[in-house]
Amino acid sequence: MFTGIIQAVGSLRAIERRGASAWLSVACPFAKLELGESVAVDGVCLTVVRVVDGGFTADASAETLARTTLGERSVGHRVNLERALALGDRMGGHIVAGHVDGVGELRLRERVESAERVVFRAPREVLRYIAEKGSVAIDGVSLTVNAVAGETFEVMLVPFTQGATTLSDRRAGDRVNLEADVIARYVARALIWEREAPDPGAAGAEKDARWRALLDGFGKGQ
């Protein structure tokens, strides 16, 4: 489990394709990394399989490469890094699993005094879990959602986040890893389960309409 508070910015220093999967070598400043520990790389939870001087190596499965941006990256690409949360650590951001829900696209960024307003497009299956003033992880960075409109949502990047993460590198058209708030996913699953559960006291059509309206509202961030 992670928090979305980026601890370092590293880079991909080698990528070795192995059929549909790949072996990644990541340059990072972390000290005393251990075999088997989890590190979030641009929001993707990877397992350390080898510790080397100035970094580590990890295996990326075909599923990981297909469902995240790691399959599109090249040597030298800068990545956000976070080690797994340890017992007693501060929960500075929000609960991040490191399991990417989908890939979004940066649509717009504009300066607002010292901050930046950034708009992203998200796949429908991810957007339904994104709500105004809720949390979302973008390339592993925990951010608060300022607004949701249509197929897009927006966040504000304060100067610290601009300097401490790779989000300052992203431009319109760039693709990013998105992970919705895990609590939102569980709430949605509970609503779906409740909708499908037998309810002898309500007419079927009325019940369907009630839950459909509730789920539609949830998907729009209401």
Image (spheres, helix red, strand yellow):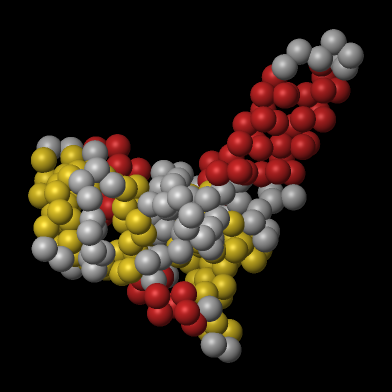
Instruction: Give percent across and percent down for residue 142.
Output: 50, 61
Tell me: 174 left or right of 110: left
Q: Residue furthest bottom?
A: 113
Residue closest to the eye, 99 or 53: 53
Say whether residue 75 is visible: no
Instruction: Give percent across and percent down for residue 217.
Output: 74, 44
Q: Residue at horizontal 28%, vertical 47%?
A: 37
Residue closest to the eye, 185 or 69: 185
Tell me: 179 left or right of 201: left
Residue 43 lies in quadrant: bottom left
Residue closest to the eye, 150 or 89: 89
Instruction: Give percent across and percent down for residue 78.
Output: 27, 68
Q: Residue at horizontal 37%, vertical 66%?
A: 7
Tell me: 121 left or right of 41: right
Say whether residue 91 is visible: yes
Instruction: Give percent across and percent down for residue 166.
Output: 36, 70
Q: Residue at horizontal 24%, vertical 39%?
A: 61
